[in-house]
């Protein structure tokens, strides 16, 4: 009787297959890495707008190509084009503010002088110790930084053009992938569910939690941030402050961080009004910021997201900041998603350990 061939054992074949899968997956991820943000946002947008796509699919009598094209077209018209116009307006307003700062039309020293004049003597002494009492020196440092930034931007025109080209390519990759995610979404999700080596119940829970957190982060956080930024821009415009759209955008970005929010922008402005004796504007901005801008999160987020899907604010804050540091701007979605998958995986492990082990029959 011949001995079995050691090169044809099922264990060796399985290990070889597993090694092949891991190497191919690593190389595949390496190839996709330049378009990591585009692919991620196509997945995020597809998850958020999937209910709309289902209605288009039903209205087109189950024609996936037509429904996918309609979904992408609507997203471009109602999301991407308005965001592009907003970014153009912000860029123009930011360039105008920088020009006013460099020309002296906006004098930072004047604002600091008014604040210093309203401070008590002990506070001015502390500023002197930290080197912030010399207004001319402080303004000179600010102007030097602005000039250096301008020279750096001028010397990198070619680099900026390359970044713009990369952005355009990534944008069209996102739309292309988004179309096929809408068209083949059901089949892709089923394939992924079959491929994940978990119990079907755990797989469904994991994929459901992933989709829920993506919807909660994109739909809830972005809408709330846009509303808070718009309300802040309206307040700044009404008070006659320069760069209302720009500062509204800054408030919208900060609103993505729970427990921080837009108060980092309107709070110092309100304090400036109080210090300079403009109490009416200070009270008005404080009331508007606390009661209107501040309550938007408590009113809109439960409606858009639902209370059951929210993670603790401290966890969202830490994972959002960590995600932005690791993945850039895409991290404000990726960070909370990773945290949600982390929590769900450990909960599934704990529940699996508590289940009684089925012993094999003798």
Image: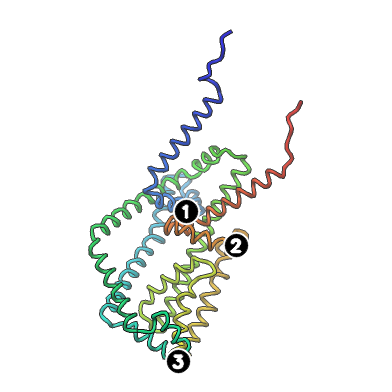
> Around disc 1, counting alpha carbons within 10 Å, would you say few (fewer than 14), some (14 to 19), or many (20 or more)?
many
Per the model, the C-alpha gap separating discs 2 and 1 is 22 Å
The Cα–Cα distance between marks 1 and 3, rounded to whole angstroms, is 48 Å
What secondary structure is marked by label 3? loop
**Can you say whether 100 is above or below 152 in the image?**
below
Percent across and percent down for residue 332 are: 47, 59
Q: Earlier in the sequence, mark 3 or mark 2?
A: 3
Identify the secondary structure beneath mark 2. loop
* Mark closer to the observer (2, 1): 2
Residue drawn at point x = 38 percent, y = 57 percent: 76
**Percent position (x, y) of residue 107?**
32, 83
* Residue tagged 1: 44
Q: Earlier in the sequence, mark 2 or mark 1?
A: 1
* Residue count near mark 2 (Cα–Cα under 10 Å), binned few <14, some 14–19, many ≥20: few
Task: Point out the image quarter for the C terminus.
Answer: top right
Q: Which residue is mark 2?
A: 312
**Secondary structure under the numbered disc 1 in the rendered image:** helix
User: Is residue 261 or residue 110 the one in the foreground?
Assistant: 110
């Amino acid at each position: 009787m011949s001995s079995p061939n050691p090169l044809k054992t099922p264990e060796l074949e399985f290990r070889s297959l597993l090694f092949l899968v891991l190497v191919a997956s690593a190389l595949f991820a390496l190839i996709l890495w330049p378009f990591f943000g585009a692919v991620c946002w196509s997945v995020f947008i597809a998850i958020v707008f999937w209910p709309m796509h289902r209605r288009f699919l039903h209205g087109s009598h189950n024609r996936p190509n037509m429904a996918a094209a309609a979904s992408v077209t609507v997203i471009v018209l109602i999301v991407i084009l308005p965001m592009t116009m907003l970014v153009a307006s912000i860029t123009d307003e930011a360039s105008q503010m920088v020009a006013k700062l460099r020309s002296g039309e906006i004098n930072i020293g004047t604002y600091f002088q008014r604040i210093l004049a309203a401070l008590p003597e002990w506070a001015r002494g502390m500023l002197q110790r930290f080197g912030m009492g010399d207004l001319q020196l402080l303004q000179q440092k600010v102007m030097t930084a602005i000039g250096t930034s301008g020279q750096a931007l001028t010397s990198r025109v070619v680099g900026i053009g390359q970044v713009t080209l990369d952005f355009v390519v990534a944008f069209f990759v996102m739309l292309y992938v988004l179309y096929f995610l809408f068209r083949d979404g059901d089949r892709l999700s089923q394939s992924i569910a079959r491929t994940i080596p978990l119990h079907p119940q755990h797989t469904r829970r994991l994929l459901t939690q992933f989709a829920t957190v993506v919807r909660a982060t994109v739909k809830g956080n972005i809408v709330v941030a846009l509303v808070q930024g718009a309300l802040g821009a309206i307040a700044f415009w009404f008070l006659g402050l320069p760069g209302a759209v720009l500062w509204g955008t800054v408030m919208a970005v900060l609103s993505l961080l729970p427990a921080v929010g837009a108060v980092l922008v309107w709070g110092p402005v309100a304090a400036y009004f109080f210090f300079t004796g403009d109490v009416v504007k200070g009270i008005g901005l404080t009331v508007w910021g606390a009661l209107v801008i501040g309550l938007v999160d408590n009113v809109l987020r439960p409606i858009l997201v639902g209370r059951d899907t929210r993670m603790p604010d401290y966890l969202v804050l830490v994972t959002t900041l960590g995600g932005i540091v690791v993945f850039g701007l895409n991290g404000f979605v990726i960070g909370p998603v990773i945290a949600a998958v982390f929590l769900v995986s450990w909960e599934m492990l704990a529940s699996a350990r508590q289940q009684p082990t089925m012993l094999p029959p003798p």
